Amino acid sequence: MAKWGLYYKGIEALFPEEWNALVDALEELDSRAPLELNGGVIELTGDGSTIQFKISHGLTDIPSFVCIGKYSSGLPDIDYWFADDLYIYVNFKSAPPAGTFRLYWLALRLLAPAPTPYIPPPPPPPPPPPVELYSPILIGFGEAGYIIDYGNISSHMPFSSSRDVTAGMPVPYNGVAKNLVIYVQSNSLNNETYIAVRKNETDTDLKVTIPAGQTGLFINNTISVNFSKGDRLSFKVDASNSTSGNMDVVGICISYYISTEGFKSIAGLGHTLWTLDYGAYEEHQVFSDATGSSKGVPLPFKCLAKNLCVYVTNNSLNGDTYIIIRKNEEDIKSLTIPAGETGLFTMDVDTLYLENDRLDFLADVYGSSGSISISGISVELIPQDTITKPIAIIGFGEAGYVIDYGAYEEHQPFSCRVGSSKGMSVPHAGTAKKMKVYVNSNSLNGTTYVRCRKNEDEGYIQVEIPAGEVGLFENNVDTLDFSVGDRIDFTIDTTASTSGNIDISAISVAYEAT
């Protein structure tokens, strides 16, 4: 700037000699970069109220540079100016007085492409509101002695003791899996272990990393995974990064929600391979992989059974197979699996179950050769009547679960496992209530005490079974509150007896989300 005798001046008006120096500088610059140039002194007329005035700049497009100055004295301060392809718009901070006044002005436009002005990117859109989720239930399993050695990968079914899964359990309605909770009882692995929810035999982002050697409760409550009706759900434990040690996983569980208002629940089973040869006729319990029972699991609330889903992994039969849903050992509806066909099969059951009605499944296999393998069965349950909060079922069905006199046994939910010192952790807070126990046979000479426990010794609901009595026993009075991560299991105490045994076919409680 010193070359042309120019210097910084602020907002004061330009003197004629300063204006000439500015024009000289611009003319020299014009020889370096082609441009259009226009300017001068313009006379404008104010009315005492208008604050914006426009000047026709005469350029062929929007100016690249504009300069405005006050030529007349006594004018209010200029606030700002801007230009379009025809005019320069000058805005005063207050209206000039009525009458004429004059302004300096200068406009130039570079004919060579001007640098693109920086335009900041628009702010990111606000995040969408969180999707409302409703009616959480529990899908998972409790275990005893589920030891995963270093270097191994183990898969596990929900509602089952079955390991090394080939296909998961189909879900009977669209839902959202969330709140993965895991309880590790012991861990001597020398590297991280990954436990994931799987969808159609593929790992999802709903997973937990367990550091080497760490035990206790692990939770992932930030990731959600959408499932559609018929998608298969299972779990995977990956200890392949370790070169020594093992891990004992007591239980894995998730919350399964729906995205529309209302209440739904699930009864079902997962089975690594429930394989049936031609001519077979076999019952299967819910919430376990127990087969051969003649009694089902008593339901702790009234509900309407709707969508039945069955997944078949292998089928070499030359005859049809019928999967039958039963109520109190009576056939209700039958789903046909044609000879040789595999994959997902569904049916609308549309049958009402009352509280205490028992639910189980039956496979009736026709043909003269071949076999069929079923990996999972599930049925949608819609709670009825006075249900005002989301409600699920926690329990298990058994076949031939005989406890001798003088025994004290711990039993996990959602499996056939006995003997664990810890229960399955719950993925959302709730209240256990309406405990049901079904006894198939009983020759004990003393009272049997069946309990639903919280954290092994922090409270329980108890059902008493008098000596020699069979059938349904219940406790609809007592309740037990659980927080996220609290552990739930069942105990059977026959220490009051000195002879005999008892065959318990099922235990269940309602779990009401809070």
Image (tube, rainbow, N blue to C red):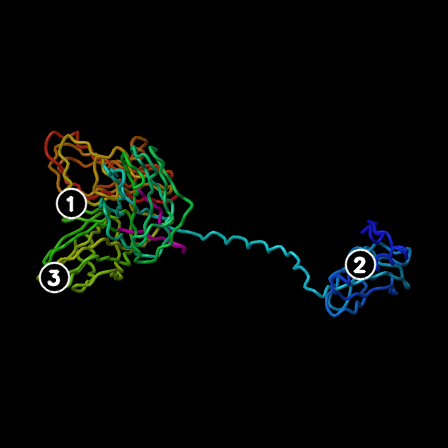
Q: Residue at x 14, y 35 (%)?
A: 467
The numbered mark at residue 399 is 1
Among numbered discs 2 and 1, the one appearing first in the sequence: 2
| Mark closer to the observer (2, 1) | 2
- Which residue does the numbered mark 2 point to in the structure image? 67
Q: Residue at x 33, y 32 (%)?
A: 213
Q: Nearer the viewer, residue 256 or 393?
A: 256
- Kind of residue at disc 2: Cys
Q: Secondary structure at mark 2?
A: strand
- Kind of residue at disc 1: Ala
Q: Quadrant of residue 179?
A: top left
How many discs mark residues in the rendered view?
Answer: 3
Among numbered discs 1 and 3, the one appearing first in the sequence: 3
**Mark 1 to mark 3 CA distance (whole Å):** 24 Å
The numbered mark at residue 366 is 3
The numbered mark at residue 342 is none
Residue 316, x across and y down, in percent: 15, 61
Q: Secondary structure at mark 1?
A: loop
Among numbered discs 3 and 2, the one appearing first in the sequence: 2
Residue 489, x across and y down, in percent: 27, 37
Q: Residues within 10 Å of mark 3 (few under 14, many from 20)?
A: many
- Kind of residue at disc 3: Tyr
| Stretch of the chain drawn in magenta | 252-267
Q: Quadrant of residue 243?
A: top left
Labels 2 & 1 near each other (Cβ < 8 A): no
Labels 1 & 3 near each other (Cβ < 8 A): no
Question: Quadrant where the C terminus lies?
Answer: top left
Check if residue 265 falls in the magenta segment.
yes
**Mark 3 to mark 2 CA distance (whole Å):** 95 Å
